[in-house]
Amino acid sequence: MSKYLIAGNWKMNTNISEAKKLVSELKDEVSFTYEVDMLVCPPFTHLYPLSELVTDTKIKLGAQNSYYEESGAFTGEVSNDMIKSVGCQSVILGHSERREIFNESNEIINLKVKKTLNSGLNVILCIGESETSRENGQTNNILEKQLTECLAEIKDDTNLTIAYEPIWAIGTGKSATPNIISETHTFIKSYLNNHFGDNSIKILYGGSMKPENAESILRIDNVNGGLIGGASLKSDSFNSIYKIACNLI
Ligand code: PGA
């Protein structure tokens, strides 16, 4: 298993020509000799054309969401089977923007996590507290609730990754401090050990990660990579974060 996963969450950004250009620029820098996985998660419409571009490269493709039914009258939704059929390996679930803007509850996310894992795809489950919850000392309670409810009935951790994304650090330019990241990742790790026993679930950090802070974040114990938004939209910054991870091995 590779030591780090560097994942890009493109959110609702890029048109197809910008997306192809970005992936071509990433492709030039990523070689099979590095022990770090690179994953890009573009919008649904780009997955198929990009899957052709990344064939025979180390770049893996993921979706930013999926629905928990297989097919049928669910206008606007995309199933795991569809995602798999266009060459994806992973799906991001439970991102705070899905929770806040699209009202996704832990129960809905749990249905999605179960379905996605059952379909053989990797899940990156996002959890994280709001600024108010942190100020009120509620962080661990919130994270424990998210983990317990989103992972209910899940016994097999093989294809599971957790992304700790404090909501107040997402898109703000202000990442969490190394102390906060260290404490929180240790808490998540011990939760996962209690829940799954011995496991090798990666815990990614997300929230304003960029080349300037990547090294100090990736050096923290129990940080196994990053889920990167803004800085994944430019090949220079995403490639530099990737290289920083490679140099830490
Ligand atoms: P950011 O986004 O890196 O732009 O803060 C991270 C995310 O939302 O996954």
Image (spheres, grey):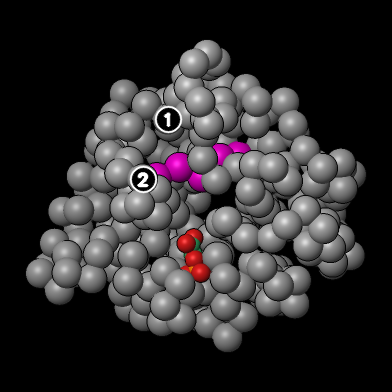
In the picture, residue 214 is in which quadrant?
A: bottom right
Element at badge 2?
Answer: loop
Left or right placement of residue 17 versus residue 142 in this view: right
Number of disc labels = 2
Q: Is residue 92 above or below residue 222?
A: above
| Camera-nearest residue between 120 and 77 | 77
Which x, y percent locates residue 201? 47, 45
| Camera-nearest residue between 195 and 243 | 243
Q: Is residue 140 visible?
A: yes
The span shown in magenta is 90-94
Residue at numbered disc 1: 112
Q: Is residue 229 above or below residue 96?
A: below
Left or right placement of residue 116 versus residue 180 in this view: right
**CA–CA distance between discs 1 and 2?**
14 Å
Q: Is residue 24 above or below residue 180?
A: above
Mark 1 or mark 2, which has the lower sequence index?
2
Q: Residues within 10 Å of mark 1 (few under 14, many from 20)?
A: many
Q: Residue at the spot x=17%, y=65% of the render? A: 133
Element at badge 1?
Answer: helix
Name the mark on residue 102: 2
Task: Indicate yes or no whether the magenta region holds residue 135.
Answer: no
Amino acid carrying mark 1 in the image: Lys
Please, what is the dominant secondary structure of the magenta stretch? strand
